Amino acid sequence: MTAAARDISVGLDIEVQTPTELEMQIAVARVPGIRLDEELAVTLDGEPVELEELVDPLGARIHRMQLTPGDLEVSYRAAVETGGGATPVTPHDRSVYLRPSRYAESDRFFALVGSQFDRSLPAAELAREVVGFVASRLRYVPGVSDVNDSAIDTLLDGAGVCRDYAHLTIAILRALNIPARLAAVYAPGLSPMDFHAVAEALIDGEWVVLDATRLAPRQSLVRIATGRDAADTAFLDNHGGSILLRSYRILATVRGDLAVDDGAGLVRLP
């Protein structure tokens, strides 16, 4: 089944304060079955910037640039169509995505899952229960967390934003012996519009998308990057100098009607 076409536009306004190497992950991932018409323009003080594109095995694209001080302007637009192809699963996935990671320290959740969940349930049912648990324990509160907060911090605080929901979901799933990872996405229907983060779980040989925030339909999401947690999927990574992100804008829409997501079904993210 082919999903409705989606349109993405992004603008970044960045002050480069000292010479630096900047890496950016905002382009739509090149994954099986995707059809993509896109344009990326980057200028520093009005002059085009040379970009080096790095593509990871899951299709995420990092654009690396060497910058001197000045005003950096980034403009990206994409028209996206996806078919029904599933995200490939490799034997390596189970090993990588069961391990504790920087923001999803699953080894600290074994006692919790032992008291909260019935491990004998099928993986799909356990995943739905984890999403329900996270949704019931957290409040969506922008600004309450920071970039250093992990899944344990989020559970103790009882609040966070999309990446916090995703990290807690991932940590609990891994503690239940279900491989899980984070996907950075564009999310038509999200309000206010922003970059969004969701969890993916390996269930019955397929990666399925889980979102305890329930802020946007999973059927319309567009993958940007995939990793163990947010450390692998940041939209900007600055190395060696200093920058100031003055503003950014994101718009993600579908052509036609936005999907209705009941939260119960298993949805694949291309």
Image (spheres, rainbow, N blue to C red):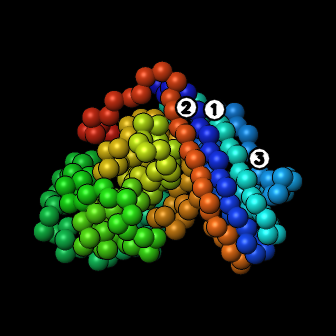
Question: Does residue 45 appear left or right of residue 132 in this picture?
Answer: right
* Residue at (55% x, 27% y) in the render: 5
Marks 2/1 in contact by CB < 8 Å: the verdict is yes
Q: Amino acid at mark 3?
A: Ala
Residue at the extreme top of the image, as rendered: 256
Tell me the quarter of the picture where residue 162 sits.
bottom left
Q: Amino acid at mark 1?
A: Ala
Nearest the camera: 83 or 138?
138
Nearest the camera: 138 or 15?
15
The location of residue 217, given as percent across then percent down, is 38, 37
- Gap between marks 3 and 2, in whole Å? 20 Å
Q: Which mark is residue 79?
A: 1
Indicate which label's residue lies in the foreground, 1 or 3: 3
Q: Amino acid at mark 2?
A: Arg
* Residue at (24% x, 53% y) in the render: 135
Question: Does residue 122 appear left or right of residue 229 in this picture?
Answer: left
The location of residue 29, given as percent across then percent down, is 61, 47
The residue at which mark 3 appears reads as: 41
